[in-house]
Every structure is written in C-alpha cells, then in structure tokens.
Amino acid sequence: MVCHPGAALGESILFLHSSTLLLISSINTRCAILLTTRLTIKLVREDQSARDVTYVQIPESYTWISGDRVWRKRQRRLCVGRIYGVSPSAGELFYLRLLLFTVAGASSFADLRTVNGDVYSTYRDACAARGLLDDDNEWYWTLTEAQREVTSCVRFRELFFYIIQYCTPQSPDSLWTEFKLSMSDDFLRRRQDAGQSREIAELYAVNDALRHLEDMLKAATGNACKTAVCLPLTRRYPRLTLGTRLV
C-alpha cells in the first residue's frame, strides 16, 4: 500500500494497492507526516501569527490537543518540536520533509512547492529551486540528524551507503571524514573490550567500518572497488574476532 505524498488539504489520504510491500512503520511515518502537515496548514490558514514560522517551530508557540486534533496557543513553557525521520530512499517524502524545515507560513501543499511565484510539480524540484540541493548540505543535515536519532551504527552505515551510492553527493569523501567516527563506534567499543588501546582501536575500527561499506558495495554492484564512490581503500588490518584479545 502507498500513501500518496501529494494529497491536498481537505482531500482524503488514499491507500492504494501496490505490488510493492511497505513496512507498517514506514506507512505510519508517511501518514503521520502528511496528516500533521495538513493540520499545520489548517492552523496557518486560521491563525495569522503562525505564518511566520516553519513546521518544526510550531510546537514552540502551540500545543497539540490530541482529543480535538487541533493546535492551541501555548500558555507556558517552551517546547522544541521534532519531526519523523525519513530516509532519502523515500523519494518525494524526503524532499517534502526538507521543505518543512525551510518554508514558513505554507497554507497548502502547493505553497510548499512554490518558489518565487512558480509552482513546481515535485517537492524535489522545489528544493532545487530554493538552492537546497546545490551542495551537500542536505546530506550533512540528514546524517547529522541520524547521528542523534539512529542508535545502531549498522543502520547509520547503511544510510551513509545509500546516500553515496544512489544520491550522488558532490563530496562523499568529505562526508566520510565528517562522520567516520560515528559510523565506526560499534567496532571501536568491541576492539576496546577486546583489549586494544583507544588509539589503535580507533584506527582499526574506522577500517572495519570501511570494510562493511565495501561489503555493501560489493553486494549492490558485484564490485568491491570503492573508487566509484570516492572512499579510502581499506588497509590490511586484522578483522575483529569477538572473544579474541587483540594487540
């Protein structure tokens, strides 16, 4: 089943049969973002003071009343809003989410796709028109957020691999340099538990993470050569064997 990302305010969100099976969690994320976006758009239409803030800033001034399914003016404490995480593999939903962080006062889904008076047919085109895709900022932003939200280093490496393999960032080597320690933290802990010093363990752990990326590349393309994605070559360090004390 697919939840259509272009549903306009006031229309039903339709679930259509599809040959592609989606995880329930993925469906729930899509629908949660679409539904809360529709309700926030409704707030912007009804409350002029909401037109100067972005989607994620709404909870700073408003509180969600779940029983009535409406936003109410916040009377007391400040609250920081957050939004469901979305993988770049989600396509248009990923770019819709990017716009929700950027566009203030959108009173319709079409407003989110409007730049300088031109209404673009896709959220990705609207992101490009706003200059959000001119560099690797979207990928730095995605990975920085994942750094906080993703508890599994394996999942973090899979997200990184997807970005460098399918999203064509301009400088994948810079992304690797920025996030390599976060991607290798599980290997670091295991090597330290096995008796290595932090300095040596960190050096080896980064190589372990590269090997995992190499394995994913080989599984995806049949070729383990990483020159296509501009990552460093792995070194001939010993692979980590759990239960063995390393030197």
Image (cartoon, rainbow, N blue to C red):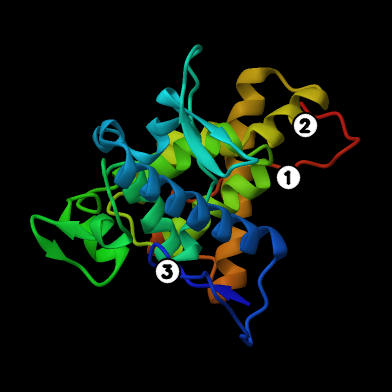
Circle nearer the viewer, 3 or 2: 3
Instruction: Identify which residue, 152 or 83, lies in the foreground.
Output: 83
Instruction: Identify which residue, 90 or 123, lies in the foreground.
Output: 123
Spot occupied by residue 135 in the image (x, y as percentages of width and height): 23, 48
| 215 in relation to 73, above or below | below
How far is the residue under mark 1 from the one under mark 2?
Answer: 12 Å
How far is the residue under mark 1 from the one under mark 3?
Answer: 50 Å
Instruction: Identify which residue, 169 or 187, lies in the foreground.
Output: 169
Mark with earlier residue (1, 2): 2
The type of residue carrying mark 3 is Ala
| 143 in relation to 63, above or below | below
Which residue position holds label 3? 7
Identify the image quadrant of the N terminus. bottom right
Which residue position holds label 1? 239
- The structure residue drawn at horizontal position 17% and vertical position 51%, both measured from the top left corner, is 131
In this view, the residue farthest toward the top is 76
Mark with earlier residue (1, 3): 3
The type of residue carrying mark 2 is Arg
Disc on res. 190:
2
Q: Secondary structure at mark 2?
A: helix
- The structure residue drawn at horizontal position 86% and vertical position 29%, both measured from the top left corner, is 245
Count the numbered circles shown: 3
Which quadrant holds residue 193?
top right
